Amino acid sequence: MKRITVAKGDGIGPEIMDATLSIIKAAGAQIEVDEIEVGEKVYLAGNTSGIAKESWDIIRRNKVFLKAPITTPQGGGYKSLNVTTRKFLGLYANIRPCMSLHPFVDTKHPQMDIVIVRENEEDLYAGIEHQQTDEVVQCLKLISRPGCEKIVRYAFEYAKQYGRKKVTCFTKDNIMKQTDGLFHQVFDEIAKEYPEIENEHWIIDIGAAKMADTPEAFDVIVMPNLYGDVLSDVAAQIAGSVGLAGSANIGEECAMFEAIHGSAPRRAGQNMANPSGLLQGAIQMLAHIGQSDVAEKVQNAWLKTIEEGIHTYDIYKEGVSKQKVGTKEFAEAVIRNLGHKPSKLKAVSYAKESTLNLPKYIRKTPLKKELEGVDIFVHWAGTDAEELAEKLQVMNSSEVKLTMITNRGIKVWPEGFPETFCTDHWRCRFKPTEGKSISKQHIIQLLQLAESNQIDVIKTENLYAFEGKSAYSLGQGQ
C-alpha cells in the first residue's frame, strides 16, 4: 500500500480528481490518500506560493503528489505553484505522452504516438533576469552538465522501459554553441550506452516543423526546458486535445503527476469536465510507484471507453461519438470497462517489475581552467563604435588591451558596418597582448580605470579555456 498526497485544486479540479480516484481505486490501485489544500484559497489567505508549510511536509514525506489544476490569482506577486514545486523538489524530468485517438477524436495525424521528455529545472526558466541599460534587459540561459545528463539518461531509460525504438534530441546548437552545444554533446555521449535504441539530433526549428507536419517520424523527443514547454503543448494539441494529456514531473526523490490543462472555472460544478488529462497523469503515477499492472488495466479501459464513443462534451462529435456524458458518467464507463481492451485503438502492455536505471549524478574530475580574457559590458548612449573604442583606449596597458566590441552579439569594432543598429549595451572584450597572460588582478585594474574615467560598467564575464579549449562565444562576424 503506497501513501500518496492529493490536491483537488480549483475550478473543475475537485470533480476530475474524484472521478480519477474512483477509477484507479476500482482498478485495484494500492494507495492511501493524504489530501492537502493548494491553490486559490491558499493564495488569497496571504500565502504567495499557494501552498502551506505543513503541506510541503506531507508531500516530502509521501514522495508522490497527484495534483488537480489550480487557479493562480492575477497580479499581487503570486508565484506559480507548478514552477515552485518542480524546483523545490528537484523534479528535473517532465514527461508528456501525446498519442492520437483516431478516428474517435479529431486529429490530422492518425499515426501519432510520441513522448516529449522536457528538462524541467534550468535553461531560461531559471528566471534570472536583469535590466542593465535603458534599452536592454537580460535573461541568463543556464545549462548544466548534471541537468543534461539526468534528462538525457531519463529519455533513454524511458524508451527502454516502454519499448520505444528511437530517441531524438532537439537543440539550437548551431547558434548557441556553448549551452545547447553542451546538451547535444551529452546526448551523443549517453546515446552510445544504448546501442539498441536509435538516436538522432535535429535543430529545433526544422525539428518542430517536422513534428507538427509528420509526428509519426518521431518516438521519444528530449529537449531543454523552453523548447520542451512549447512543443509539448503543440504535440498534445495536434494529437487531439490538450485536455486529454497528462504530465509526470520526476525527481530523484519525489514526483508530481497532473493534467496539463487549467482549472476552467467556467465549467466548475457542472459535471461536464473531461477527467482524461488527470487520469493520464494518474496512470503515469501508478507505473512510477510499481503498480504497472493497474496502470495497464486503467489505460486499456480508458481506450475502450473512448473507442465506444462515450465522450464528454469537449471531444463529442456527431456521427463519431455515441453518447455525450458528464464527468461522473465517463468515470463510471471507464470502471465498467476495467479488464477489457480496445479492439481498434492499440492496447497497451507495460513492463512488469521494471525500474528505470537512474544513477545519481557523480561530479567529474575538475577540468584544467585557464583565464584568457574578460568581457566588460558597458552602458553607453552613443551609437558610433569607433568613438566608444577611442574612449576605452585609456584602459589598455602593455599587458591587456581592447580587442573587440560587439552590440547584441554583432561585432561592431574593429571593422564594423555603419549600417548595424546599436543599442546602449556594449560588450567590450579585453585580452592579453601577445606573449602575456591575464590575471584577475588585471581585471580589477581594468574596472578601476573604467570607474576613474566615468565608463559605466554594468557587468563582467571572465573568459576561460577548459582543457586548452576556449569556452566562450565570439562576436557574430568573427
Image (cartoon, rainbow, N blue to C red):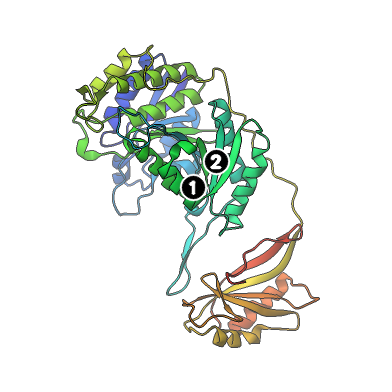
Query: How many other residues sit within 10 Å of disc 1, few (<14), some (14-19) or many (≥20)?
Result: many
**The quadrant where residue 34 appears:** top left
Query: Which percent across, then down, holds residue 17?
Result: 32, 27
Question: Height in image: 449 above or below 149?
Answer: below
Using residue 40 as the reference point, say whether residue 360 is left or right of it.
right
Mark closer to the chain start, 1 or 2: 2
Query: How many other residues sit within 10 Å of disc 2, few (<14), some (14-19) or many (≥20)?
Result: many
**Residue under label 2:** 168
Residue at image position (21%, 25%) is: 326
Residue at image position (57%, 45%) is: 201
The reply to whether residue 182 is visible in this rendering is yes
Query: Which percent across, then down, holds residue 254?
Result: 51, 33
SS type, badge 2: strand
> Do the numbered discs 1 and 2 sit on residues whose CB atoms are within 8 Å?
yes
Using residue 373 as the reference point, say whether residue 214 is left or right of it.
left
For the C terminus, give its image quadrant.
Answer: bottom right
**The quadrant where residue 168 appears:** top right
Badge 2 amino acid: Thr
**Residue under label 1:** 207
Query: Looking at the image, which is closer to me, 402 or 254?
Result: 402
